[in-house]
């Protein structure tokens, strides 16, 4: 879809075509195209069907808003899930408290997922992107959601913006190249040196980056926050203008934890095994999670925690340990056969084994289920046979560094 085709979608005729395409979502593509071609030309038919399909995919990220928004395939892929964008917008508002309606410069706005959340939170947003089609989509989204009076979107290069003219800088550099997704910040667009230059000139800044960003790329003095949504790490955010801390945040619950410096002890496997949430692992907060559950590490280099008491916490999934074995396919197969286990969930950390090949080699047969955890214990390949406990009835117990202070403090 090019800019001309998208612009036509915004006309009354284009809106009718898009509405009709939406009603055909899920139908045979050839039949849907044939139906629309009876009324509309090939270009508008293609644009409408593409947009209707993107709206359907976007519901997972944007909920009901997706039904009136506009997307590009790349823009949808990189856009922030609405719940995560709303969390970040609340933090921006808190960071800029006392400044009325904070002014924000969004230096790489994409289709506008973040600028929409910022505008809804009460910010006045100026946004730029280098791609005219992407800018048109972002403008259309602001209009569709009734936020056009709080948003200005123009075609411009992020390197040319003046963050010092705004209360807050927000940047979400593109992390895809012609060869696909990149995990190297130097390959971001704009490149990392340009991003750092913008940060240096901003009073307060919020920078969205990939969850796997190498620690050496985190600017000195910045807060690094890893955000997980329903147990899946979605992104990392770098905050400047406040304290240099490491933070993990769990959504939708809003739990947040900062580093306290506690180190987890090591020791033998107990009655329970805890798998920390990925955000806590990325933020190097495994010691803090171990403190919550009163646990220890079976291996000092592996992010599994074991303990003797059952503790329910949003920071870790708990499994009840039934057996611990040095890894041997023959012994594992025999142990599962003895327990009549025919269905397994296989997890691994610190193991090079191929999960699907192992599943086939186990020749499972039986009515029971188990969780198989492949890991290292004292640097030796090991396997734990576990079961998932019943759903928790109580909230987390024990000492916890969890807090809800999400402000950026000097």
Image (cartoon, grey):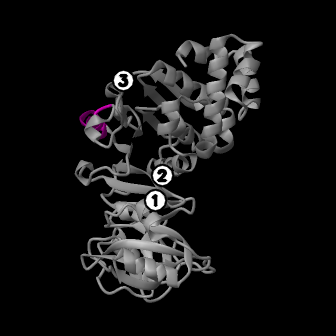
- Residue located at (37% from left, 43% from top): 205
246 in relation to 336, above or below: above
Q: Is residue 274 highlighted in magenta?
A: no
| Real-space CA distance between mark 1 and mark 2, rounded to the nearest whole angstrom | 6 Å
Instruction: Mark 1 and mark 2 in contact? Answer it, CB < 8 Å.
Output: yes
366 in relation to 221, above or below: below
Q: Is residue 192 highlighted in magenta?
A: yes
Can see residue 404? yes
Residue underneath mark 2? 91
| Real-space CA distance between mark 3 and mark 1, rounded to the nearest whole angstrom | 31 Å
Tell me which numbered mark, 2 or 3, is placed earlier along the sequence: 2
Place of residue 80 in the rendered image (x, y in percent of width and height, measured from the top left)? 50, 43
Residue underneath mark 3? 157
Tell me which numbered mark, 3 or 1, is placed earlier along the sequence: 3
Q: Which element carries disc 2, helix, strand or loop?
A: helix
**For discs 2 and 3, the disc positioned in front in the rendered view:** 3
Q: Which element carries disc 1, helix, strand or loop?
A: loop
Identify the image quadrant of the C terminus. Answer: bottom left
Residue 358 sits in which quadrant? bottom left
Mark carried by residue 406: 1
Please give the range of residues in magenta: 190-201
Instruction: Mark 3 and mark 1 in contact? Answer it, CB < 8 Å.
Output: no
Q: Which element carries disc 3, helix, strand or loop?
A: loop
179 in relation to 206, above or below: above
243 in relation to 101, above or below: below
Number of dots carrying numbers:
3
Residue 166 sits in which quadrant? top left
- Residue located at (56% from left, 25% from top): 137
| Real-space CA distance between mark 2 and mark 3, rounded to the nearest whole angstrom | 26 Å
Place of residue 68 in the rendered image (x, y in percent of width and height, measured from the top left)? 68, 32
């Amino acid at each position: 879809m090019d800019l001309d085709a998208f612009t036509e979608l915004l006309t009354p005729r284009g809106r009718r075509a898009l509405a009709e395409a939406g009603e055909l979502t899920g139908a045979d593509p050839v039949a849907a195209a044939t139906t629309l071609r009876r009324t509309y030309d090939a270009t508008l038919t293609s644009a409408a069907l593409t947009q209707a399909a993107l709206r359907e995919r976007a519901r997972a990220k944007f909920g009901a808003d997706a039904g009136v928004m506009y997307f590009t395939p790349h823009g949808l892929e990189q856009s922030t899930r609405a719940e995560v964008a709303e969390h970040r917008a609340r933090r921006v508002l808190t960071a800029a408290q006392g400044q009325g309606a904070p002014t924000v410069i969004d230096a790489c706005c994409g289709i506008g997922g973040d600028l929409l959340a910022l505008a809804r939170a009460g910010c006045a947003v100026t946004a730029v992107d280098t791609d005219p089609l992407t800018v048109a989509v972002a403008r259309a989204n602001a209009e569709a959601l009734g936020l056009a009076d709080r948003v200005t979107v123009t075609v411009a290069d992020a390197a040319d913006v003046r963050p010092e003219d705004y209360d807050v800088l927000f940047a979400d550099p593109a992390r895809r190249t012609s060869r696909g997704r990149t995990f190297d910040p130097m390959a971001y667009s704009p490149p990392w040196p340009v991003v750092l230059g913008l940060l240096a000139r901003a009073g307060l800044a919020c920078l969205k980056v990939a969850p796997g960003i190498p620690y050496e790329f985190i600017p000195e003095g910045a807060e690094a926050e890893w955000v997980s949504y329903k147990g899946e790490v979605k992104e990392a955010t770098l905050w400047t203008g406040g304290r240099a801390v490491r933070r993990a945040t769990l959504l939708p619950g809003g739990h947040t934890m900062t580093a306290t410096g506690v180190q987890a002890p090591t020791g033998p496997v107990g009655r329970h095994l805890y798998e920390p949430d990925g955000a806590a692992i990325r933020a190097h907060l495994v010691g803090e999670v171990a403190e919550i559950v009163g646990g220890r590490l079976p291996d000092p280099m592996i992010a599994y925690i074991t303990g003797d008491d059952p503790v329910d916490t949003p920071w870790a999934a708990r499994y009840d340990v039934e057996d611990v074995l040095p890894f041997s396919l023959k012994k594992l197969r025999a142990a599962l056969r003895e327990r009549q286990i025919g269905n397994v969930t296989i997890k691994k950390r610190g193991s090079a084994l191929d999960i699907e090949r192992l599943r086939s080699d186990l020749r499972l047969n039986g009515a029971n289920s188990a969780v198989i955890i492949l890991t290292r214990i004292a640097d030796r390949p090991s396997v734990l046979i576990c079961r998932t406990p019943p759903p928790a009835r109580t909230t987390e117990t024990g000492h916890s560094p969890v807090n809800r202070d999400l402000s950026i403090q000097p």
